[in-house]
Amino acid sequence: MASACLGSCAATCACSACKTCVNGLSSVSRFAYFMLFTLSIFLSWIFRDYAQGLMKKIPWIDHFGVRPSDEWFGKQAVYRLSFGNFMFFAAFSVLLVGVKYKGEARAKLHTGGWFVKLITWLVFNIVPFFLPNESMEVYSAFARFGSGVFLIIQMLILLDFTHAWNDAWVSKEHYGWVAGLLSLTTASYALAITGIVLMYKFFNPEGETCDTNVTLITVTLVMFVLFSAISLLPQVEHGSLFPSAVIALYTVFLCFSALGSQPEDYKCNGMGHKMDNTKLWIGMIFTLASVAYSALRAGSASDSFTFRDSVTSSTPLVSAPGSKTMTRSDEDDDEEAGSVGGEFEEVDYSYSFFHFVFALACMYVAMLMTGWGSPAATEGKDTIDVGWTSYWVKIASQWVMGGLYTWSLVAPLILTDRDFL
């Protein structure tokens, strides 16, 4: 009996150790992918500003009768690094589609083989430098669309973060935490209103007729007042003022950034490009923060598209399908039950969607660093994140963002036969 008990305990401990190891590998993998993404950003920044001379020495890139500007060569380097990283994460996203259990062979592509992965990542970053310039023109056009999608996902990540923050502080049931939440809400709305006032001042200069700018600013104001009011209605069970305040502030930032992306010589751009570097840094910080949050937060993002954690409290304490309960009467099946349980343990999040977010983020970073412009050889010196393409992408993303958030508030009232988290 003693030996049987010891054998049962050993099998149980081994199974638990394996599960802990697999979960640990998953967490480490998420952090490792994030570090690769961060490294790609810094490489792009360095290449954009300091690798123009190297790019000029590549004959299939510099093959023009009239040599383009240094800025063009810097942007070429950014697009090629971005394309390589996009292909790296997109390839993993495709390969991992449909992975449901940690024991699947394809799941190990996500968590293991890091030496091979690093070599593959380096290869993906080098190969684009052998591609013709025309391929980068195609990629830049595609990246504009992908960047707009990432802006929407960024909003969903931000919304999930604010909801989690709101729930965490409210659940503490202490006046201090509620007061802190109220202070942050007030500050967010104050900054949003300040942004509206500044936009009316700088993007509707005195003596100029700027009806489009005024309309866009007014729409932004009406938009966040509307969804803030809806979130306070007693019928809206999942409404909360703090998430609405943060989304309001972000929509104001998007509008401010869009109007600031208008060309410097445009009559309705009273600010010029005084805050170009500030906008770039804010955009980079938002990108890194949102990608880090989606990478390091456990949850099934693809099922709900809200980046929420799975409800672990409802997970039954039974073996996985096909395994047997570990009791004394089943001592001979202990080892088999442990192995089957590990094989059929569901993944904590969608591996495919995880890499999909990174792939979109690679395109968005390229757009930020190149001003959303085309890498055409005839293009001269350009400032950061300026142009009508950048302007309309941000405006469209803001409208979709406001519409999605408003829909998330009213959908449970309209679709009463559906369950919403």
Image: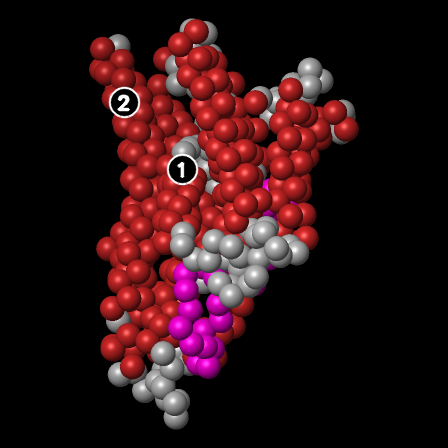
Q: Amino acid at mark 1?
A: Tyr
Q: Nearer the viewer, mark 1 or mark 2?
A: 1
Quarter of the view holding residue 22: top left
Crowding near the residue tagged with mark 2, few <14, some 14–19, many ≥20 C-alpha atoms within 10 Å: few
Q: Is residue 161 magenta?
A: no
Q: Which mark is residue 13?
A: 2
**Residue drawn where x is 57% and y is 61% of the image:** 267
Whether 235 is drawn above or below 386: the answer is above
Location of the C terminus (image quadrant) = top right
Among numbered discs 1 and 2, the one appearing first in the sequence: 2
Crowding near the residue tagged with mark 1, few <14, some 14–19, many ≥20 C-alpha atoms within 10 Å: some
Instruction: Farthest residue to the bottom: give it.
Output: 65
Whether 86 is drawn above or below 74: the answer is above
Q: CA distance from mark 1 to mark 2?
A: 32 Å
Label 1: element kind:
helix
Q: Amino acid at mark 2?
A: Cys
Segment colored magenta:
372-401
Q: Decide which of 245, 117 is in the foreground and name it.
A: 245
Location of the N terminus (image quadrant) = top left
Q: Decide which of 63, 222 is in the foreground and name it.
A: 222
On the question of residue 42 being in view, the answer is yes
Tell me, yes or no, whether the two marked residues, 1 and 2, touch with CB atoms within 8 Å.
Answer: no
In the rendered structure, the answer to whether residue 83 lies left or right of residue 123 reads: right
Q: Is residue 400 magenta?
A: yes
Q: Which mark is residue 293?
A: 1
